[in-house]
Amino acid sequence: MANVLLGATGSVAAVRVPVLFEQLTARGHAVKIVATKPATYFFDPAPLRDHLTLDADEWPGDRYTRGDEVRHIELRRWADLFVIAPLDANTLAKLAVGLSDNALTCVWRAWDWAKPVILAPAMNTLMWEHPFTRKHLRALAADFGAAHIPGHFDEAMLVRQINDRAKGLRIVGPISKELACGDVGAGAMAEVPDVVAAVGEMLGRK
Ligand SMILES: Cc1cc2nc3c(=O)[nH]c(=O)nc-3n(C[C@H](O)[C@H](O)[C@H](O)COP(=O)(O)O)c2cc1C
């Protein structure tokens, strides 16, 4: 059993954050959540508040006092694994270039690379198929030691290549279905049991 940090970003698939929390907890893991502000548009943070870090928790008072907790560093120290589900297009871009303007991306930027990470992208089909997505996934893959993936792959093949080659990084690729916006195609977050299974597998590899 492990300390699992669940990151949530502003995709409609964040409606699944409570069930992800529940299922990871049911596996015996201790689970904490770090969510972006847009993520909380899609689930009620109140019942999860004791387990949840929001940006406001990083900046709790009027002024920093030496010795105050630095929450994103505490979370990184605590966690054995970081799973970001759902990962939206905006935060994918931030992870790829190292922007750290909220609690979640600060955890990522301060991450200890000896510990595994799992990303479950979720976005509209045209966002998923946009060249930026491949560019950003490739950048992340290179950071995890999987450079030189041939250039002609589509998104699904790219995800497979990354999962074969990148050490410590697992992408749980999106699935095709009718999306919340009414479009039909790839981009919906993988099913919750698949995300939970990836957590088990990555912890098993450690
Ligand atoms: C109703 C609604 C649904 C959205 N769904 C998605 C989505 O599934 N995937 C995505 O990449 N962006 C989606 N967005 C856009 C993101 O919420 C937006 O880019 C936001 O700035 C993301 O911020 P964050 O990455 O800090 O969470 C949605 C926006 C709205 C208003």
Image (cartoon, rainbow, N blue to C red):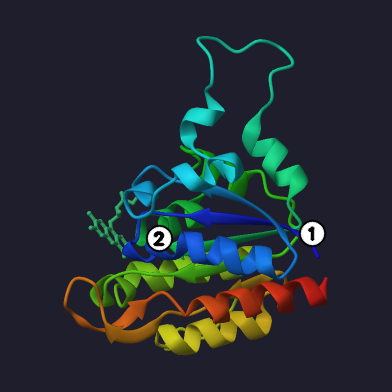
Residue 86 in picture, x, y percent from top left: 45, 64
Residue 155 in picture, x, y percent from top left: 41, 83
What's the residue type where badge 2 is placed? Ala
Residue shown at 70%/45% (left/top)?
A: 76
What's the residue type where badge 1 is placed? Ala
Residue 172 visible: yes
Residue shown at 18%/71% (left/top)?
A: 181
Ligand 1's image quarter is bottom left
Residue that carries the numbered disc 2 in the rendered image: 14
Q: Tell me which numbered mark, 2 or 1, is placed earlier along the sequence.
A: 2
Residue 87 is marked as none
71 vs 185: above or below: above
In front: label 2 or label 1: 2
- Secondary structure category for the residue under label 1: loop
Residue 199 in picture, x, y percent from top left: 67, 72
Residue 114 is marked as 1
125 vs 34: above or below: below
**Of 169 and 70, the residue lying toward us:** 70
Q: CA distance from mark 2 to mark 1?
A: 27 Å
Residue 145 visible: no
If the image is split into quadrants, where does the N terminus sit? bottom right
Residue shown at 38%/62% (left/top)?
A: 15
- Secondary structure category for the residue under label 2: helix
Residue shown at 45%/51% (left/top)?
A: 94
Residue 116 in picture, x, y percent from top left: 71, 64
